[in-house]
Image (cartoon, rainbow, N blue to C red):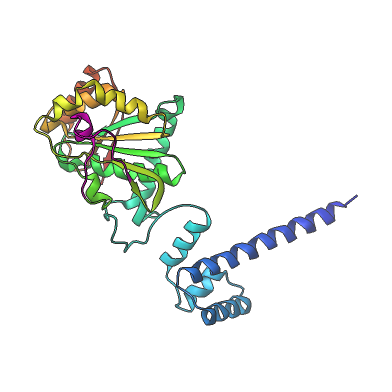
Amino acid sequence: MNSLTDIREQDAIARAATSIGAEANIGKLLQNAGKLNPQDMERVLHLQQMEGLRFGEAAQKLGLVSEDDIRQALSQQFDYPCIPADEVSLSPELTVATAPYGKEAEALRSARSELLLRWFKDGRKTLAIGSVRADEGASYLAANLAVLFAQMGRRVLLVDANLRQPRQLGMFNLGKGLGLSDVLAERVPSVQMHSVKAFPTLNVLPAGSLPPNPAELLARPAFGALLSRMEADYDIILVDTAPSQLGADFQLVAARVGGMLIATRRNVGRVAPLAELKDKIALTGAAVVGAVVLG
């Protein structure tokens, strides 16, 4: 039988082996990303041994990699998808993807945690996100929350039901295409989903062609039926809606979904219009899940 000392020694050896493996993996990831060549690796390993540094610290001290390079490698190691801050394929508004370690991203993670505890915990899958004005950040909030849930490994669908001023295709740089309005108007036989390369579990259903009758399209039973079908394929469905100042579309969406999260911005949103929006949501029978005040 092993003694307590033997067990402790074995644990220490195991921890050391895990640490060495993790450090080597970081170096391999940086090398695979083209940040380090074999000669650089030797220099880093030499400095690491001489000064007792972690691999990333030694590489940074030699000026071979940046802090962002290390974070990208760690993101891969821990299966946490994000993209470099200078990645041009996605909008810089996708804060949680381009700057995942900043204060804004942390605040949005807090909102995600609240939603998991207060809305999605009882088997609910779908949530609408709306605002009073177009500049209060509903589309921004919906897109970033979609990325955050995808970073957890959840299967996420982001639906752009803002059929007046859609933004999601542009934020994810997905080009142009048919979408929700075309399906509801029966112009296409099937849903046109767009995958997001950087986040394999995230799909976007764009708004589609700008219709002359958005409220009438969203009032059709086909919209509710579509959401119900999608719930079988996704863990989280976030529905971006048009601001209330542009029409009653948000009420139709809220009624179908059953709950809405309100987005507003500091020094932009006003108490009276927000209270009116809350009352209008309540009239549909939907719940006001909460409000997120963006900077």
Horizontal side of residue 47 vs 104, given as left or right? right
Task: Classify 6 as above or below 286.
Answer: below
Q: Is residue 288 visible?
A: no
Where residue 182 sits: x, y (%)? Answer: 19, 35
Residue at image position (74%, 61%) is 13
Residue 179 quadrant:
top left
What range of the chain is rendered magenta?
176-194
Horizontally, residue 294 falls left or right of residue 16, namely left
* Residue furthest left in the image: 212
Q: Is residue 146 above or below residue 19?
A: above
Q: Which residue extends farthest front?
A: 189
Measured as percent of width and height from the top left, residue 174 is found at 26, 51
Compared across the picture, whether 186 is left or right of 98 comes to: left
User: Which of the pair 273/201 is nearer the observer?
Assistant: 201
Q: Could you tell me how many numbered marks the image carries?
A: 0
Determine which quarter of the picture holds residue 146: top left
Q: Is residue 90 visible?
A: yes
Our reading of the magenta stretch's main secondary structure is loop
Asked whether residue 184 is drawn in magenta, I would say yes
* Image coords of residue 246 (percent x, y): 11, 33
The residue shown at (66%, 60%) is 18
Magenta includes 203? no
Tell me: 127 left or right of 186.
Answer: right
Residue 45's x, y, as percent? Answer: 59, 77
Would you identify the image quadrant in which residue 63 lies?
A: bottom left
Tell me the residue at 35%/43% (across/down). Answer: 203
